[in-house]
Structure formats: structure tokens, C-alpha cells
Image (cartoon, coloured by chain):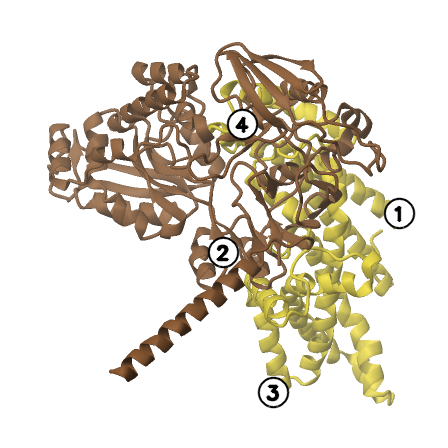
């Protein structure tokens, strides 16, 4: 008995010692280190003028290091992508159309360049913000600033921005939050060099920028936040397999765009996988095209699909989440799985009944439903990606109830053109459209543009319009959820899953955040360091 | 010869004009443009899409667009990229020399493998050496370069850690930096050509080696080495050089996969990006440059052949 107690005691002591040692080691290794180079693999670099970044993520990631904006998209749990203070330390809204920003004092532009010689940089002031907003209003592509009616400097550190109508999304990345602050002198003096060697007030300065090849950035010693890294090398490796090999070789620390299929293997090899840019994937209908203009057909197809089985077979659990609506979990506004889940029902018998009610029966006994001599046969149009395998499973399920569905894989531009022109009855549906994606995709005003479902439901239009002008978050979120519910009830969409594009880093990289609406290396919330 | 070159240049200009028309028309007839893609995913608003179409004159009738394009082209202006906002001329000027370097290196790799192997194979006809050379050349021809590229990258970059895995080296960082970056992409690009040229060298050698003038040379008591290199090689090499030249032009426009795998900043990658993003101005510019390069190469091959064999005349 005493031997057993003694053994237990020894085991307990050993465990305690091990835990203490491990805790010490973890605490020691978690101590941020100064210096070092972070090598990031991207797919292209072309032009980092902050007004010309539309559609090029890699350039946005570099611009995020060179420039500061008034706000940045938070990565804090529960506040993901909500605007957090950056150059603006605070702001207030005296009324629904006026925003007053109070700038951080003592922030300077980068020096040691053509514009500001070493030691001669000047402070970022309200006039710079006004100048940058006006420049954005004149020429920015991809920023939604239509509602901004003016910007003026109240004093050295205070800026007032007015909007024509209440604009609750003003501070988000696609709006004013995407306006990066530039000094007028840089624009005037650098001219075309703004595209490759711009000057801002961000945590890193451009050392070299070779389009299509590489960007080298060094630490801005005068940045208002401490910066751990000495240098960032952003290398262009367009081929995804080569990019993964470069990561595995240790020559690249962080790969910001890894194919979903590769992620589980790299995770097993000990790499860290993170994702932030969840975006919606589903099946969409053009609700004006026969036979999908009949709600019963859309509802029956929805009921005949076992989406859970299909998406789980393809997407690793770390990289996806089941979708019941269009709004992804990273947006607190409108994300409503509890409310929408009951609308998702897998019921083959009910599906068959609905199709029969709509006039679709197998009259000739060939196994395919038909109506007026025409079989229920269609292509689901898509472009390449993990969704093709999921759709393959789903079309097999549809054959079980006599629907002859197949997949038509297209070039992405052709796919987009077909959708916009209304040539696709049913299609793979996806959206990177950000916070206001629901409006882009389902508002009647966007038909023949981003509303490829051709849905023109007055209730949806009304709710989305009202939400877009509602400053109160709770009320706006409620309106958004109601609009989304109607869209799902209408079966304009069959939500499948939210997919995150994985970013993968080796274990020497710490305190990093997966890119998503920008890349945050140094912010008030994180400061990347390398061992 | 001068008249011949002048005639060829005139034909080249006319051919390029026809190519601009075909490329312009086919690109415009293909559904989709970059603005449609951004519009469908909600990245831009319908108003901005209209503004962008007006800015890039995509809202004009196709013949007006073509007229504008030709007018600018005549002034050396290939327009601005839809996606990068950079002048197309600048983008091409930046990457064309890189593709040229890679292609020259690949052709050098191909010749330096093909000629010795081809000669060895023909001299040892129907022996195990010949069989081995033929197997090697068949493997070279048959192996897809995307697979070979990734294999080389995995072994020499990842596992053995001997060579750089991406990008171009710079002479300012030393000769080894420049050469080491060039090795893997040049070998990948040159392997298929090496296989082809090995077979061609072999058959050309076999053809010449049985000619009367070779027998005469041997009868005169010349050493076999002299017979082979002075009498046979000089004649046998002409079709090999012609084929190498033709393939050089094709490689200039066909290095897309290799440039993508090895992140080589060249014309192929520029063209691939333009195709994927429906960047019409860049696509037109790269196609034009590819076509012009091929024509210049063919002309150069003719001129080189006339120097190798003074009997060849183009007048």
C-alpha cells in the first residue's frame, strides 16, 4: 500500500514538475522578439497606389503596411471586422449624417525618402485626411464612397465627414475605412512612383518594389506603435504547389493563399493554419428562368439535397462552416444560423410531392421527371474549385428523385457573364462582397449586375434599403436578418457552407492574423514577431 | 539578301496587322470581361462598372475600339492594363528581357544535351548506347514540363536545398546568384527540346554519315574525329539549327507554365494573368510581342543558316 502511495506521489511530483517546466518554456518562447525578417508568399504584386487597389489582394496587403487608415478591421473575437481605431483615436456622430474624427497626435509620415529626407518628416494632420478622402472621391476604384458629401478639417487633429444619407457602413474597409492617408507632397512629387514607392505613415517603409517579383519593406523606426519585425519580404510565387513547397522548405514563413486541399496535410506537418475571410458558397437560382421560376421546383431541389454530407466530405472542419444563409459568421450583423436552420430540411418524399404538384412526373418511365414532354434536366454552372466536388455529390443526390442535373464547369469570366446576362437558371453561388453582400446579391436594383438571382422582391428591397440607412446596430441587424430570411424562404439560394481561404505559417511566426480585408502585421491588437 | 530581308519584314508587318485584328476580334467575342467578374461578386457597384466601361471605352462599338487600338499602336502605345493600371508597354518592357534570357538558356541547355547525345547515338547506331540515348530523348519529349518542374523544385529546392526555388537572380548579386536561379527553369523548359533535337541530330547525322563526301574524306585518311566534326557535323547541323530556331520562337511564347511554377517574372506569366483576368490590353500586347518574336526568330534562323552553309541563298 505504501509502495503504491509512494509511486503515486512520485508520479504526481513528476507531473507537477513537467507542467511547471512546460509552462516556463511556453512563457519563455512566447516572449516577443525584436528583429528578424518575415518572408511572405503572395501571388502577384503590381501597383500599390492606395487609390488603385481594386481586385488585387497582394497589393492591398503591402499598402496596409505602408499606410495608415482612420480605422482597421478588428480581429478580436466578437468584434471581427468591426472598425477599430487606428489613425483616428476616436470618433463621434453628432447626427446621422455627420462624423467627427479625432486624430492621434504625434504620428509622422515616413522619412528617409524622396519626399521627406531623414529626420524631416512631418506630422499627419487633419488636412492630410481631407486631402486623401478627396483624392479617393476623385479616383478611388472599388471604394464605395458615393454617400460621402464632404470632408473638412475642423482643427489640426479633427476632421468632419458628412454624408448625403445616413451611412452605417462608413468606417468599413470598402468605404472610408479603406481610404489610406497619403501626404499631398508625396502625390505631387512622386507622380507615377506612387505606384511602387509611395510614402505613408504605416509601420513599414518600402525599400524596393519590383512588380511581379518582390517587395522588401523595412521597419518604420518612428512608428507610433512598437514594431517587432525589422523587415518584410513579400515574394511572388504564382503557382500554388510551388508556394506550398517554398513554405515547406522554410524559405517562406507565411503563405497567404493555400489551396484548401493542402491545408489538412500541412496542419498535420505542424504548420499553423488560420483563416479569416469566410465567404458564402451555395447554389443559386435565377428565379425568373423556367422551371426555376416555380417556387415548388426550387423548394423540392432544396429538400432533395443532403448538403451536410456533401460539404463535410470535401471541406476540412477547420476551414469551413455550414451555411444556412448568406451572411457569414465573421459578420455580427445579420448572421442568423439559429433563425435559418429550421428552414433547411432534407425530405425526399416531400420533394417528390412538390415536384408532382408542379407537374413534374416520370410519365415515360425513363427514370427522369418530365413535364409537357420535356425532361427536368439542367446544368449547374460553376467555375473550378473545391465546390466542383461538392456539386458532384449533390447532382448524384438529385438523380435519386429523377432530376437529371449535371455540372458545367466554366471559365470564371464566362460564368460571371452568363449569370449577369441571366443565361444561367441554376449556378454555383458565391460572394466575397463583404458586409453589404446581401444587398449586392439580392436587391432588385442590382439585377443585371451583382443580383444574379434576378430576385426583385419588394419586401427584400425595402428591408435592405431601410437597413442601409439605419444607424442603430441592433435594429439594422434585425432588418438584415429579416431580408435574409425572405431570400432563403423564397429559395433564391440553397446555402451550403462558408469557406475560408487558409493562410499557413511555420512555427517561428507569432501573433499573426490571417489576412481578410487586409493584412494586419502591426496594429493595436497584434504585433507579429519571428523566432 | 538585303532585298530578301526587306521583303520578309514587309510580310511580317502585314502578318502582325492581321494578327492584331484576329486577336482583337476573338478577345472581344469571348464572353466576359474583368468588370463583369467584379460586378457579379459584388466587388464593384453597377455605377462604378459603367464608369469603368466608359473609361476603358468598352462601351463603344467594336470597330471604334479597334480603330482606337490601331491608332495608339501606331504611336507605340499599347494602352493601360485593366487590372494593374500600368502602361502595357512598361509591363512588357519589364518582363520581355527575362523571358528572352530564360529561353536562350533553355535553348543552350537543349543544344548542349542534344548534340553530344545525337552524335553519340548515331555513331553507335543500334548499340546499347544508341538505345539508351533514344530512351533518354523519348523521356525528355514525353515528360510534361509542369511535372518535371515540380519534381526538380521538390528535389533540388526542397529536399537537397541546393538551388533557389523562385524568382530571377541578379548579376549584381554575383554570377552564381544569376545562374543558380536560371538552372531549374532552363532545364525544365529545355528538356523537351533537347529530346526532340537529339532525335533530329541522330537522324541528320545518320543521313550525312553515309554520303559520298564523307566516304571520300575517310578515304583520304582523315581522322574519324575530323571527319565527324568538320565534314558531317557542319552539314548535319543545319536542320537542327532550323528546328532549334523554330522552337526558340515557340518557347518564347510557350514558357507560361515554367514561368508560373518557378515564379519567373516573364511574358508567359504576364499573358496567363491577362487571360485569367480578361485584361484585354495586356493580352493583345503580349500576343503581338509573341508573334513578332516568332517572326524575327524565323528570319534570324534563315540568316544564320546562310552563314553556316554559304550554298544557301535567298535571292
| Mark 4 crowdedness (10 Å alpha carbons): few <14, some 14-19, many ≥20 | many
Q: Quadrant of residue A405?
A: top left
In whole angstroms, how far apart are the C-alphas of marks 4 and 2?
29 Å
For the C terminus of chain A, the image quarter is bottom right
Q: Nearer the viewer, residue B83 or A369?
A: B83
Marks 1 and 4, how far apart at CA? 60 Å
Query: Residue B251 appears at what percent x and percent y?
Result: 67, 55
Residue B139, given in percent of the width and then of the height, sits at 57, 71
> What number is the disc on residue B2?
1
Residue matched to label 3: B128
Chain letter for the residue marked with disc 2 in the picture: A
Colour given to chain A in the rendered image:
brown
Q: Which mark is residue A174?
A: 4
Distance from the alpha carbon under mark 3 to that under mark 4: 68 Å
Tell me whether marks 2 and 1 sit on the same chain. no
Q: Secondary structure at mark 4?
A: loop
- The chain assigned the colour yellow in the figure is B
Mark 2 = which residue? Answer: A272
Quarter residue A408 falls in: top left
Q: Nearer the viewer, residue A474 or B282?
A: A474
Amino acid at each position: 500500500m505504501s509502495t503504491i502511495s509512494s509511486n503515486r506521489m512520485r508520479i504526481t511530483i513528476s507531473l507537477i514538475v513537467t507542467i511547471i517546466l512546460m509552462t516556463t518554456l511556453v512563457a519563455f518562447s512566447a516572449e516577443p522578439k525584436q528583429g528578424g525578417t518575415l518572408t511572405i508568399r503572395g501571388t502577384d504584386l503590381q501597383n500599390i497606389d492606395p487609390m488603385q487597389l481594386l481586385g488585387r489582394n497582394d497589393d492591398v496587403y503591402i499598402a496596409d503596411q505602408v499606410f495608415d487608415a482612420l480605422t482597421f478591421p478588428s480581429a478580436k473575437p466578437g468584434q471581427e471586422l468591426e472598425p477599430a481605431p487606428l489613425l483616428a483615436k476616436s470618433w463621434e456622430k453628432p447626427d446621422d449624417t455627420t462624423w467627427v474624427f479625432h486624430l492621434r497626435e504625434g504620428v509622422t509620415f515616413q522619412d528617409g525618402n524622396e519626399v521627406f529626407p531623414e529626420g524631416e518628416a512631418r506630422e499627419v494632420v487633419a488636412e492630410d485626411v481631407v486631402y486623401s478622402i478627396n483624392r479617393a472621391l476623385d479616383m478611388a476604384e472599388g471604394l464605395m464612397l458615393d454617400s460621402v458629401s464632404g470632408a473638412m478639417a475642423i482643427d489640426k487633429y479633427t476632421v468632419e465627414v458628412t454624408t448625403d444619407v445616413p451611412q452605417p457602413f462608413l468606417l468599413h474597409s470598402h468605404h472610408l475605412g479603406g481610404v489610406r492617408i497619403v501626404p499631398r507632397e508625396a502625390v505631387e512629387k512622386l507622380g507615377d512612383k506612387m505606384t511602387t514607392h509611395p510614402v505613408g505613415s504605416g509601420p513599414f517603409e518600402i525599400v524596393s518594389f519590383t512588380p511581379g517579383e518582390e517587395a522588401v519593406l523595412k521597419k518604420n523606426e518612428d512608428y507610433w506603435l512598437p514594431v517587432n519585425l525589422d523587415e518584410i519580404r513579400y515574394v511572388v510565387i504564382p503557382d500554388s504547389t510551388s508556394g506550398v513547397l517554398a513554405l515547406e522548405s522554410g524559405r517562406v514563413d507565411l503563405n497567404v493563399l493555400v489551396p484548401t486541399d493542402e491545408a489538412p496535410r500541412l496542419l498535420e506537418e505542424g504548420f499553423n493554419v488560420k483563416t479569416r475571410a469566410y465567404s458564402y458558397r451555395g447554389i443559386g437560382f435565377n428565379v425568373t428562368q423556367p422551371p426555376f421560376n416555380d417556387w415548388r421546383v426550387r423548394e423540392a431541389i432544396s429538400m432533395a439535397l443532403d448538403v451536410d454530407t456533401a460539404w463535410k466530405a470535401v471541406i476540412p472542419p477547420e476551414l469551413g462552416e455550414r451555411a444556412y444563409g448568406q451572411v457569414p459568421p465573421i459578420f455580427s450583423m445579420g448572421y442568423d444560423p439559429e433563425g435559418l436552420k429550421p428552414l433547411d430540411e432534407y425530405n425526399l418524399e416531400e420533394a417528390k410531392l412538390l415536384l408532382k404538384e408542379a407537374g413534374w412526373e416520370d410519365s415515360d418511365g425513363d427514370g427522369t421527371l418530365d413535364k409537357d414532354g420535356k425532361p427536368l434536366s439542367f446544368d449547374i454552372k460553376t467555375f473550378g474549385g473545391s465546390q466542383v466536388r461538392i456539386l458532384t455529390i449533390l447532382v448524384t443526390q438529385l438523380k435519386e428523385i429523377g432530376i437529371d442535373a449535371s455540372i458545367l464547369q466554366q471559365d470564371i469570366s464566362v460564368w460571371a457573364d452568363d449569370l449577369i446576362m441571366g443565361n444561367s437558371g441554376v449556378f454555383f453561388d458565391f460572394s466575397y462582397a463583404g458586409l453589404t453582400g446581401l444587398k449586392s446579391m439580392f436587391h432588385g436594383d442590382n439585377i443585371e449586375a451583382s443580383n444574379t438571382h434576378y430576385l426583385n422582391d419588394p419586401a427584400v428591397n425595402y428591408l435592405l434599403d431601410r437597413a442601409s440607412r439605419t444607424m442603430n446596430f441592433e435594429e439594422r441587424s434585425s432588418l438584415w436578418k429579416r431580408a435574409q430570411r425572405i431570400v432563403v424562404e423564397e429559395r433564391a439560394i440553397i446555402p451550403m457552407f462558408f469557406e475560408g481561404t487558409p493562410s499557413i505559417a511555420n512555427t517561428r511566426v507569432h501573433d499573426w492574423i490571417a489576412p481578410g480585408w487586409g493584412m494586419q502585421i502591426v496594429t493595436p491588437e497584434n504585433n507579429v514577431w519571428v523566432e | 539578301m538585303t532585298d530578301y530581308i526587306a521583303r520578309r519584314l514587309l510580310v511580317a508587318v502585314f502578318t502582325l496587322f492581321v494578327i492584331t485584328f484576329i486577336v482583337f476580334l476573338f478577345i472581344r467575342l469571348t464572353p466576359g470581361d474583368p468588370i463583369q467578374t467584379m460586378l457579379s461578386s459584388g466587388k464593384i457597384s453597377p455605377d462604378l462598372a459603367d464608369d469603368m466601361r466608359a473609361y476603358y471605352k468598352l462601351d463603344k462599338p467594336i470597330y471604334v475600339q479597334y480603330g482606337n487600338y490601331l491608332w495608339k499602336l501606331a504611336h507605340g502605345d499599347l494602352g493601360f492594363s485593366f487590372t494593374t493600371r500600368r502602361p502595357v508597354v512598361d509591363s512588357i518592357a519589364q518582363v520581355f528581357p527575362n523571358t528572352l534570357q530564360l529561353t536562350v538558356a533553355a535553348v543552350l541547355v537543349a543544344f548542349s544535351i542534344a548534340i553530344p547525345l545525337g552524335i553519340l547515338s548515331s555513331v553507335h547506331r543500334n548499340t546499347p548506347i544508341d538505345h539508351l540515348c533514344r530512351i533518354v530523348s523519348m523521356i525528355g519529349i514525353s515528360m510534361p514540363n509542369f511535372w518535371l518542374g515540380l519534381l526538380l523544385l521538390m528535389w533540388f529546392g526542397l529536399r537537397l536545398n541546393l538551388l533557389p526555388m523562385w524568382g530571377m537572380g541578379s548579376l549584381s548579386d554575383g554570377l552564381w546568384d544569376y545562374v543558380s536561379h536560371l538552372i531549374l527553369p532552363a532545364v525544365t523548359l529545355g528538356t523537351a527540346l533537347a529530346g526532340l533535337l537529339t532525335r533530329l541530330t541522330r537522324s541528320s547525322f545518320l543521313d550525312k554519315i553515309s554520303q559520298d563526301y564523307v566516304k571520300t574524306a575517310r578515304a583520304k585518311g582523315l581522322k574519324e574525329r575530323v571527319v565527324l566534326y568538320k565534314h558531317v557535323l557542319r552539314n548535319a547541323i543545319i536542320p537542327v539549327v532550323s528546328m532549334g530556331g523554330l522552337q526558340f520562337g515557340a518557347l518564347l511564347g510557350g514558357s507560361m507554365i515554367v514561368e508560373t511554377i518557378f515564379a519567373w517574372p516573364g511574358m508567359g506569366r504576364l499573358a496567363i494573368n491577362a487571360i485569367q483576368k480578361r485584361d484585354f490590353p495586356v493580352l493583345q500586347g503580349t500576343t503581338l510581342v509573341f508573334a513578332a518574336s516568332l517572326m524575327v526568330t524565323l528570319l534570324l534562323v534563315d540568316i544564320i543558316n546562310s552563314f553556316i552553309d554559304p550554298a544557301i541563298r535567298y535571292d
